[in-house]
Structures are given as C-alpha cells and as structure tokens.
Image (cartoon, rainbow, N blue to C red):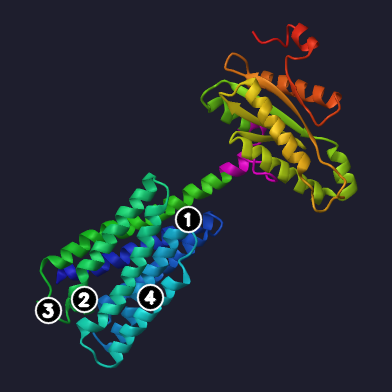
Amino acid sequence: MDTTVSLYTLMLGLIAGLALLALVVRMGTQRHASLGWLVGALGVGAVNTWLFANGGTAPATRAALYVFDPLTLYCVTQAVRLSIGQQRSSTLVALVMTVLCGLSVTLVAVGAPIGVEALPAMAAGLVAYGDALSTIWRSPRSFIRDGLFVSMGVMLLTDVVRIPFFPTLLDAGRAYPGLGPDWLPEFLLVTTSFAVPAVVLFIIAAIVTRVIGTYRDRSERDGLTDLFNRRAFTDAVRQHRPSVGVLVVADIDHFKSINDNYGHATGDEVIRHFAGLMGGASRLAGRLGGEEFVIALPGASIAEGEKIAERLREAFARHRQPDMADDHALSASFGIAPYSGRHSLAECLDRADRALYRAKRQGRNCVAIFGTDQRERDDPALAFG
C-alpha cells in the first residue's frame, strides 16, 4: 500500500515539475502550439492522477476518469504530432474517441459492471496511442524520433497492462485491497517514472530542434524566394561533393522596367517564378541579390551547364505573368563558368558574372560561357590554371 501511495505522490510531483518546465520553454519559443497541448495534457493528467489517488470509487469519479484519461492521451498525441511538424489528428480520431468515452459514461449511468464500463474508455486511449505511434513511425528517422517512439511505446505497454486491473487502482488501491497483483504498483512506478518524463523531454527536444532549424533557415534563406542567400550558397557549394562543376549565374533582363510599369508586387511575383525555375534545376540555388541568381551543378561539364541554362532561358521566355501585358516578353541572360577546389568560389563566381555581362552586351536573352571571348582568354588574371 505504501508503494501505491508513493506512486501517486511521485506522479503528481513529476507532472508538476514537467508542467513547469513546459511552461518555461513555451515562454521562450514564441508560444509553440505543441507546448500548449503538452501543458494541457499535464494539467488534465494531474487531475486524473488526483482522482485515482483521492477520488474514491463513486460513479462520478469513474465517469470523470473515463473522460480525463483518454483526454490526456489525446492532448499528448497532438503535442507529439505538432512537435514533429505534422498537423493535428483528423476529426475522425477525435470523433471515435468521443463516442467511446461517451459509451463508458453511459455504462456507468446504467450500472454496468466496473470491469465492463472501463473498456470503451481504455479503447479510446488505444486509438490515441495508435495515432501518435503511427505518426512518429512515418516521420524521418532521428534520435528524437526514435526516443519518442520508444517512450510512447512504454506508455502504451503500461496502459495495456493496467486494463484488467483498473478497479484495483481506484482510491489509491484502497477500494479493492488484495485483488491486484503485488507487482503491479512497482511496475507502474518504474514504467511511469521513465515514460512520462521521457515523452515530455523528447517533445520539448523536438520543438527546440524545429525552432533552431527555423532560425537557421531564416539566416540562410532569402525571404522572398526561399533560395540560399549568397553566404549560405557559398557555404553549401564548398561543403558539397564533388567539389568540381559548373556555376550558372542569371539575371532577369530589364527588371527595373517591370517594377516601374507594373509595380513591385508584380516584380516580386516574377522573381519568385524565376527562382522556382532556378531551384528546380539544382538543389544548390541562391539569390545573389536583386534579380541576380546562381545555381551550382556539381560534377557537370560546361556543355551540360549550357544545356541547362538554355532550357531555363526558354522556359522563362515562355512564361506570361498574369498582371503584365500579353505582349510583354520576359527574358533572362546567363553566364557560365567552371568551378573547382583549385580556385576560390568567389573567383569562379566573378568569372561567371563576367560571362553574364557579356551576354547582356550581346543583346540579352542568351547564354555566354566564360573563356569563349578572346579578351578572357588573353587576360592572365582570368585564366584557369
């Protein structure tokens, strides 16, 4: 009996401490929705634990437990789903759980045996577990994902084991002394003290990881196009293997006239469309500033780079922006240069830029390759050695 009492005391202490931790993290992470559900789960779980410990065996207590117990798991499931970047559970999950809880409450009202009345509510909890575990399983593998899966699995095991002995847990085990197995309190103590904190901490870890990733993306990505900014593009190319390939720099022709004639909102849409084309050609795509973009093609030859640049040029020329006049043709100019570890990326970008501006001088809407101009071949400072 002493062990049983200590179980509920430990549970309340754990829940209070974890709820405080979740609140502190919530205040520091721009009120992440997952933490709201987590705090809700801990709050409902605290009421649930108190009812098990001190609520007696009255029908009202049992009816409340048949609502609060599955509700705790539903809130945990939403916290798990949101923490790993998924949407909330479907309406069907909530509806099924509500019906099952309502069935348990109805069975209490009609005086069904206590072992029978608890089954629908326990089934509602299993629905929540199934939703959470399947969502975690489908998410990308990581230490946090695996930790969440294992700790939620231990929680599921704990709840499955307690189903046949549910009545013996009421009123801190005083209601039906001697009916439950002697090992049950110790089992619940060990599994609960591991699983509940683990789930909470892994949820918080998942949230913090996503928040850090969001801030990193904001520092590395261009806000309008979601392509790399110049610094992040340079870092990404340096880290990528193979370390040789082709740079394709592009600039939208006469872009200022688009802004002047149609407004900056239309200009932004044109930039986004062109950025989508560039990003579709390579994962290593960046916006260098204004209307100038770049992609890296690791392992590609000059001929392959030229083919891709021509394809991009033609695709952009075919595009008609809805807010612009039908006869306003869009175009872009391209410059190509090789890159390798023997030269700094800044030097290689400069060479691709020189080819780009040669394309501009040649009439725009064309592709120029660095080194095909006599002056570039004759200038020792520009030659590749």
Q: Circle 2 is placed at which residue position? A: 166
- Bin the neighbour count of mark 4 within 10 Å (Cα to Cα): few under 14, some 14-19, many 20 and up: many
Q: Residue at x 78, y 14 (%)?
A: 373
- Bin the neighbour count of mark 3 within 10 Å (Cα to Cα): few under 14, some 14-19, many 20 and up: few
Q: Is residue 14 above or below residue 335?
A: below
The three-letter code of the residue at mark 2 reads Phe
Label disc, if present, on residue 177 of the rendered structure: 3
- Element class at badge 3: loop
Q: Residue at x 57, y 31 (%)?
A: 236
The disc, 2 or 4, on the residue closer to the chain's N-terminal end is: 4
Q: Is residue 122 left or right of residue 4?
A: right
Asked if the residue at tag 3 contacts the one at tag 4, i.e. Cβ–Cβ closer than 8 Å, the answer is no
Find out whether residue 220 is within the magenta segment. yes
Q: Is residue 379 in sight in this rendering?
A: no
The three-letter code of the residue at mark 4 reads Met
Image coordinates of residue 381 in percent, x first then y, are 73, 9
Q: Circle 4 is placed at which residue position? A: 97
The disc, 2 or 3, on the residue closer to the chain's N-terminal end is: 2
The three-letter code of the residue at mark 1 reads Val
The disc, 4 or 1, on the residue closer to the chain's N-terminal end is: 1
Label disc, if present, on residue 25 of the rendered structure: 1
